[in-house]
Image: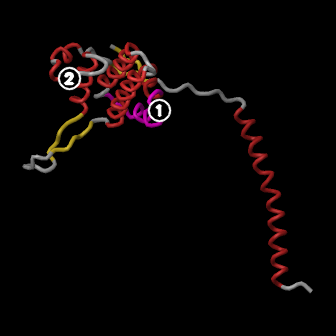
């Protein structure tokens, strides 16, 4: 005679065996449909961006070497980094009448990305992973893009920056996938 407890255990194990077998076949059928659906698709090229570019000669001539300071990548880069900091950051009083201030960053995604790229280039040059000339050329292009797009609508561009991982991918975005129209 089977007790109620053993009957439920047998019923439960039978149920597990029957449903387990059907669930084993589901991933196989899903995989087949996924493979068949993906066979005709082509990979989509990453988006490129077009912005208005501007000559910075006038602004750069106004910046003295004392204002810009020294930079590992040279005087021109130091002046552009100074200009980047000046244009993208602003000191705002925390409370009116209080001398304490806080720094407000315009377009923080772009600004912080450029600052991280600056550190990346400095470390790469110091380690000898990249030549100083190519670092100057690439970072100069990054700074030109960042300075030109300050007053542009960059929501899609910022979303693309946030989607990328690693400084090399972000450098590629700034140097190869952005077209500045002068």
Quadrant in the picture for the C terminus: top left
Side of 127 relative to 15 (left or right): left
Side of 33 relative to 6 (left or right): left
Q: Residue at x 32, y 25 (%)?
A: 146
Q: Position of residue 112 (x, y in %)?
A: 34, 35
Mark 2 surroundings: few (<14), some (14-19) or many (≥20) residues within 10 A: few
Residue 158: in magenta span: yes
Instruction: Work out whether mark 1 precedes mark 2 in sequence or the reverse, and give the earlier one.
Output: 2
Q: Secondary structure at mark 2?
A: loop
CA–CA distance in space, label 1 to label 2: 28 Å
Q: Residue at x 70, y 34 (%)?
A: 38
Which is more toward the observer, 50 or 161? 161
Q: Count up the numbered dots.
A: 2
* Mark number displayed over residue 142: none
Residue 65: in magenta span: no
Which quarter of the figure has residue 21? bottom right
Which is more toward the observer, 37 or 55? 55
Residue corresponding to mark 1: 166
Which is more toward the observer, 162 or 53? 162
Q: Position of residue 50 (x, y in %)?
A: 40, 21
Q: Are marks 1 and 2 in contact (CB under 8 Å)?
A: no
- What span is colored magenta in the figure? 152-168
Which is more toward the observer, 120 or 170? 120
Residue corresponding to mark 2: 69
Mark 1 surroundings: few (<14), some (14-19) or many (≥20) residues within 10 A: few
Side of 33 relative to 42 (left or right): right
Visual colour scheme:
secondary structure
Q: Is residue 118 above or below residue 76?
A: below
Q: Secondary structure at mark 1?
A: loop
Q: Position of residue 44 (x, y in %)?
A: 58, 27
Which quarter of the figure has residue 180? top left
- Secondary structure of the magenta portion, mostly? helix
């Amino acid at each position: 005679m089977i007790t109620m407890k053993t009957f439920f255990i047998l019923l439960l194990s039978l149920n597990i065996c029957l449903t387990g077998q059907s669930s084993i076949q589901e991933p196989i059928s899903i995989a087949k449909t996924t493979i068949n659906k993906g066979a005709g698709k082509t990979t989509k090229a990453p988006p490129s961006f077009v912005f208005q570019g501007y000559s910075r000669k006038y602004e750069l001539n106004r910046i003295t070497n004392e204002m810009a300071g020294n930079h590992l990548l040279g005087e021109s880069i130091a002046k552009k980094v100074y200009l980047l900091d000046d244009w993208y950051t602003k000191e705002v009083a925390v409370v009116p009448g209080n001398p304490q201030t806080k720094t407000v960053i315009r377009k923080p995604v772009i600004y912080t990305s450029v600052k991280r790229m600056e550190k990346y280039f400095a470390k790469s040059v110091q380690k000898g992973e990249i030549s100083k000339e190519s670092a100057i050329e690439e970072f100069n292009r990054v700074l030109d893009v960042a300075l030109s797009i300050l007053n542009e609508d960059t929501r899609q561009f910022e979303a693309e920056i946030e989607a990328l991982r690693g400084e090399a991918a972000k450098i590629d975005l700034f140097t190869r996938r952005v077209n500045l129209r002068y």
